[in-house]
Image (tube, rainbow, N blue to C red):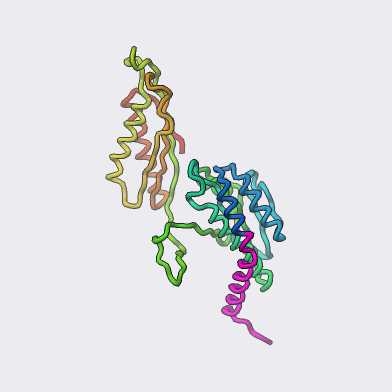
Amino acid sequence: MTVVSKLDSSDKARNIIARETNRLRSQLEKVCLDIHSHPELCYEEEFAHDTICDFLERNGFTVKRHAYDISTCFEAEIGNGEHFIIYCAEYDALPGIGHACGHNLIALSSITAFVTAAKAAVELGILGRIRILGTPAEEGGGGKIRLLDAGAFEGAAAALMSHPTSMGRIKEVEGLAGAAGLVTVAATKLTANFFGKAAHAGATPWQGHNALDAAVGCYVSISMMRQQIKPAERISGIITNGGTACNIIPEKTSMEYSIRSSTAHECIDLIEKVTNCFEAAAAATSCQVETET
């Protein structure tokens, strides 16, 4: 009887994964480049969804399209046993600048990991299940939150993905650069709509309540507050609606802020501080404000 050590199994798995990656390289590169050439915003990733599903089906996997009542989500699984891991594939883009965050590369890495690990598991008879989950709407749409609520991650031993980063941020070793188990941050988005009263800016401006003044006052207050936030915290925002015409006192304006902190608890504290700036600016300009996280 031949005893196969865990090290032998690991080496065999690595060899199978490398061989399968090379076999599928041209197909995988095409999927990645096609998604990059067709950037789609959150919950609109129809091309990416179909492209990935088609690739998986061509290579013998059974795919559940439009999974978990999300039109651009998909799921495929292979193996047997109680324990399973999930590879998360992201593929949405950013408004105006496409795949600047590299979600086509995230999709590529997760697809590659899934199909090659599946090949190794089958050939070596490894017990357990491997799943790939299409996770749309990462850029502000809360896609994974919906998937968590729908039970997509229920019982998983681990949920894995890799994210590209800028060159030079991670030390290169033997021509390769990467890192595992990085510390992540808690992040959320906060929107504010200010409501004032329109008036003619040239004839009777005193009749108006300027919602743009509220937005600008809020922006300045938050900018000054940054001096007192912690080194790992970030607050960044834009005015998404500043009014409709320069000779009309703006009746409504809108802002959107991204808030990040080291922990969820600290993020909640930061949201409260930003919300206070919203409310103070509204009170100072006799406007009303509605916020949403």
Taking 19 as reference, is 61 above or below it? above
Considering the whole magenta stretch, tell me its main secondary structure. helix
**Which residue is rendered at x = 38% and y = 36% of the image?**
275
Q: Residue furthest bottom?
A: 1
Q: Residue 128: where, in percent of width, then height? A: 64, 66
Q: In the rendered structure, which segment of residues is drawn in magenta?
A: 1-27
* Residue 218: quarter of image: top left
* Residue 250: quarter of image: top left
**Which residue is rendered at x = 39% and y = 25% of the image?**
288
Taking 138 as reference, is 285 above or below it? above
Q: Is residue 168 left or right of residue 52?
A: left
Q: Residue 50: where, in percent of width, then height? A: 66, 49
Does residue 153 belong to the magenta stretch?
no
* Residue 240: quarter of image: top left
Q: Nearer the viewer, residue 123 or 36?
A: 36
Q: Residue 268: where, in percent of width, then height? A: 40, 44
Q: Quadrant of the N terminus?
A: bottom right
Does residue 12 belong to the magenta stretch?
yes
**Residue 148 can be seen, yes or no:** no
Q: Residue 238: where, in percent of width, then height? A: 40, 37
**Which residue is rendered at x = 67% and y = 57% of the image?**
56
Q: Is residue 293 left or right of residue 36?
A: left
The number of numbered badges drawn on the structure is 0
**Residue 287 can be seen, yes or no:** yes
Taking 245 as reference, is 117 above or below it? below
**Which residue is rendered at x = 61% and y = 47% of the image?**
150
